[in-house]
Each structure stands twice: as structure tokens, then as C-alpha cells.
Image (cartoon, helix red, strand yellow):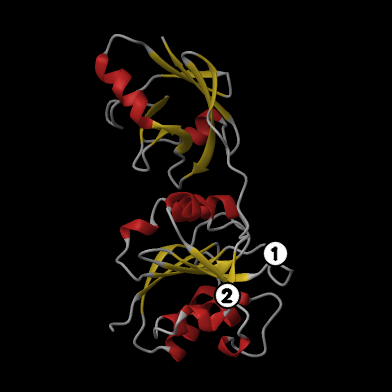
Amino acid sequence: MPVPLIALLTDFGYQDFYLGIMKGVICSLTPEANMVDLCHGIPRGDVRAASFALRHSYKYFPSRTIFLCVVDPGVGGPRRPIIVSTEHHILVGPDNGIFTGVYESEESFTVYAITSDHYFRKPVSSTFHGRDIFAPVAAWLARNIELWKFGEVIRDPVRLEKIPLRRLAEREFHGTILYTDIYGNLISNIPAGDVEKVAAQGSIPISFHIKDQLQVPFCRNYQQGPEGRVFALTGSTGFIEFAVRNGSAAAVSGARFGDTVRLVFG
């Protein structure tokens, strides 16, 4: 079988040498490996942001892609190293909730606790499991080693607490800011589908309120948005996001992860 793609997601950035070392370990074990950088700008230790980014990207990759995910503030602690197998993809990383978005997106999946340490690089550092555990395991997986050889199936993977969309009245909903991208766009947990339907009718006013302080309009695209002001639109994730044309909604609004967004119809 052809060697599958390995996609890497970390909070390492590009200033230090940690990312390069992980790639070196993979190439040492599987020289023919093909790698792609999914994202290395996850805020340091932000498992929830990593889960969000992974959820909205992994399905765009070819079948059999292996995702090597290292956002691991608990490295060296009791959290387990795991492999997650879905119908089309394999994911490797810490059992700290980073794969929550994948669990929520898949109808079925299998999780293995990695206990077969002969696949690890020795000695195993207490601070760099990306180098000594996760990268070697990803490299061996790319050589089509059967998943059961890495460890036993577990039924209790760690999941991050779900942040629900709350309905306060017939036409009023409270959402939450879940993610801020590099442009300062604020992505919420408000599904855009119903908003789009109401907007298409044109007869019911739509308004959004960020932190119950800033009221912003709903626009069709970035070009339609008012210059220098925050507006709402449907983002590429399928959720409502807030933007400023040629600017940063995060900077203008002062909003960040966890802040409330109120949607009002009429």
C-alpha cells in the first residue's frame, strides 16, 4: 500500500527547533513519509483551540491520512497517549480532549491507548513526548502497522465539556465565541444555516450583540461589511463569525474565547 500522508498540528510555532525534530524522527523511521503542516500556530497549551481547528479541517484530507497532534500541556503527567481510528483517518496524540471535535463529528470511531513502548524512541523525555512517543508512532503507522499492536481499545477517552447554544426566548439565542483566527475573526458556536434562511426572507430583522455591549449587523460577505466596524457573516466553518473589513474584530470588540454572543430575530 502507498505510504499515507502525515499531517501535523501543534502549538510549537516556527521559532524553535521542536517541529523540525519531530519531522526528523519520522523521516528516520519512515524515509518515504510525506508530511504536510496543518497548523503550528495554536495558542500555547490551548487544547480547545486545537480541537476546534482539527474538527474543521481533518475531513478535507485524503483517506488514510495520519494526523499527528501535539498540544500537550500535561506532558509527562498521567494522561494517556492514544490513537483514534475513524472510517477514513487515523489520529495520534495525548488523551487530553484534543480529539473532542473528531468524536463529535464521527458516527463511530475506535480509540487505542498506546502501551507498546517498543515503538517509542528511547529514552523517553518527560517534556517532549512529541519527539519520543507521538512522532515515532505516527511513523510506524505510516508503515501500515496494525493498530492493535500499539495497545488495547479504551472506552473512556477524555472529552472537553461541550459549550451549548442556549435558547432564551422564541427568537433569542445565546452563543459563545469559540475561536479567534490570525485575522482577528471571532468564530462562534451559532450555526449559520437558520440565520441564512431568515436573512433570505428579508422580512425579519437580524441583530447580533457581542458581550451584550456591541450590536452588529449581519452581512453576506467581507466586502459588504462596513469599514472599521464589526459585522457578522457566515464563516467557512458553517458557523457565524464576526469580522472587521481590513481590521480585527477581536481588537475592536475586545471579545475573546468564552464571551457571549446574543442573536435576536426581529
Q: Residue at x 57, y 31 (%)?
A: 254
Place of residue 189 in the rendered image (x, y in percent of width and height, measured from the top left)? 48, 35
Q: Residue at x 63, y 60 (%)?
A: 156
Separation of disc 1 and disc 2 at Cα? 12 Å
Relative to 216, is 21 on the left or the right?
right
Give the quadrant of residue 259: top right
Q: Which residue is mark 2?
A: 130
Is the residue 25 above or below the residue 41 in the image?
A: below
Is the residue 183 above or below the residue 27 in the image?
A: above
Amino acid residing under circle 2: Gly
Position of the C terminus, as image quadrant, is: top left
Place of residue 112 in the rendered image (x, y in percent of width and height, measured from the top left)? 56, 71
**Element class at badge 2:** helix
Task: Say if residue 92 shows up in the picture.
Answer: yes
**Element class at badge 1:** loop
- The mark found on residue 74 in the picture is 1
Q: Residue at x 56, y 58 (%)?
A: 98
Task: Work out whether residue 40 or residue 105 is closer to the camera in this orientation and state it.
Answer: 105
Place of residue 211 in the rendered image (x, y in percent of width and height, measured from the top left)? 58, 24
